Image: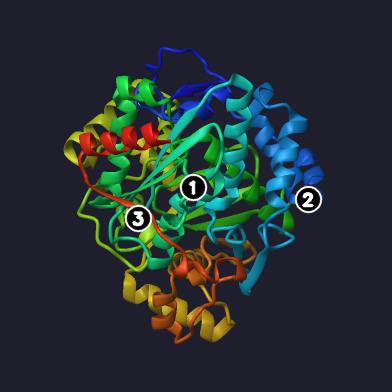
Amino acid sequence: MHYRSTRGTELSDSPGFADILLSGLAGDGGLYMPEAWPELSPAVLREWRALPYADLATETIGLFTGDDIARPALQEMCRDVYGTFRHQAVAPLCEVEDGLFALELFHGPTLAFKDMAMQLLGRMFQHVLQQRGQRATIIGATSGDTGSAALEAFRGLENVSIVILHPEGRTSEVQRRQMTSVTDGNVLNIAVEGDFDLCQDLVKAMFADEAFRREVGLSAVNSINWARIAAQIPYYFRAALALGGPDREVSFAVPTGNFGNILAAWSARRMGLPVRRLCVGSNQNDILTRFLLNNDMSMRNVEPSLSPSMDIQVSSNFERLLFEMLDRDAARCSAIMKEFRATGHMAVPHDAWQAMRDVFEGTAFDDAQTLEAMKTFHDQSRYLADPHTAIGLATGARFREAGIPMIAAATAHPAKFPDAVRQATGLEPSLPPHLADLFSRPERCTRRPGELAAIEEAVRAHLHRA
């Protein structure tokens, strides 16, 4: 399997999986995509129904790793990683209402769906770096869950240093402490004065700084890294196959910020999974919903919300979908994305927008509506949902069709957002035993202004100490 950039000016032709794993972002600022999509027949999908999750993940992800990671090594990684999850099914389905299912993706070590991919990425990075005799510095931005998942996956690894930027004061207290209490020597936490979009821009700016990129051996594990998307695709296959696929259509509803999780669902559809609708759930930062309803992709100020992982105005992975809807015309994609960053408005051609509307729906819930959804699902179904999951379930309920199972991504454990859960339901969600002492653990974090020079200086200082 080889890859190309969504912006098409990458100097290195057709890099393989190991190269795009370590580089993360393409040198031209674009995002990597497979040169060709794997096509799966209904017969193959029926055979996959009987596979345990780890083996299904091996089969799915192996289509993208190609020969860069030997199949036995990939299978060992998948079995080791998913064997540690707290639920035997890894990503179980729970029927919340008739025909509405929660796909629980929070049974990993940090209680969020990011563990589903990040735990495997840690193993992949170590495997490839050891084979090559190299070191890497991973830089990531987080709106809450990516950071803790990445730190948990990469802490203590010999060949990797990891730096995570989070927007100061804009995560939940549990999310923050899950990051700042990771004090391994290869870890640097930076609280940035600004919002998530600024953190994400700083990461991209570091990648654009070629001298700095080479100096520190820069890599990324945000969902700009295709390996993250590839490792999220399997749970969509698992959920659909459990409910009758490929002989029955399903729909998915996903609470969406950076667009990576729902892009993985679209990817499964593109590979042959019968998916009827993909439903985007937004909070009051509703740029994606406005786009889907009215072709209005225009940036506004980010508003802090009860669902901070969705407090985003620049959804990086949307570029990958745009690239596909433009028939992989990298020059057009590059021009549209550059204009978007320059003007704050994305001029998506009508035919590309209509092609997206043929598959995607969008809706938004403000904080009051989110709390009401949390209360309703608990009162009527006894299902305790965090704010993001509640938006996913409410989105699924809104677009549910008779006879078509609607699967909502349950992206975080309710204990990650205790204040919102308490406000909505009066209940105090408990952290699992392995996190029971979280609020008494020592913390380590560096505070920096949202300026590229200040962040690069902090990274250099950290690597010098390490």
Seen from the viewer's position, the closer of residues 242 and 66 is 66
Residue type for callout 2 = Pro
> Mark 1 and 2 residues: CB-CB less than 8 Å, in contact?
no
Question: Mark 1 packing: few (<14 Cα in 10 Å), some, or many (20+)?
Answer: some
The residue wearing badge 3 is 289
Residue 285 at x, y = what percent?
Answer: 29, 58
Seen from the viewer's position, the closer of residues 99 and 125 is 125
At 54% from the left edge and 58% from the top edge, which residue is drawn? 110
How far apart are labels 3 and 2 at the CA level?
A: 35 Å
For marks 1 and 2 on the same chain, the one whose residue lies earlier in the sequence: 2
At 40% from the left edge and 48% from the top edge, which residue is drawn? 258
Residue type for callout 1 = Asp
The label nearer to you, 3 versus 2, is 2
When asked about the image quadrant of residue 388, the answer is bottom left
Residue type for callout 3 = Thr
Compared with 6, 92 (above or below) is below
How far apart are labels 1 and 2 at the CA level?
A: 33 Å
The residue wearing badge 1 is 184
**Seen in the image, is 425 located left or right of residue 276?**
left
> Mark 1 and 3 residues: CB-CB less than 8 Å, in contact?
no
The residue wearing badge 2 is 52
For marks 3 and 2 on the same chain, the one whose residue lies earlier in the sequence: 2
For marks 1 and 3 on the same chain, the one whose residue lies earlier in the sequence: 1
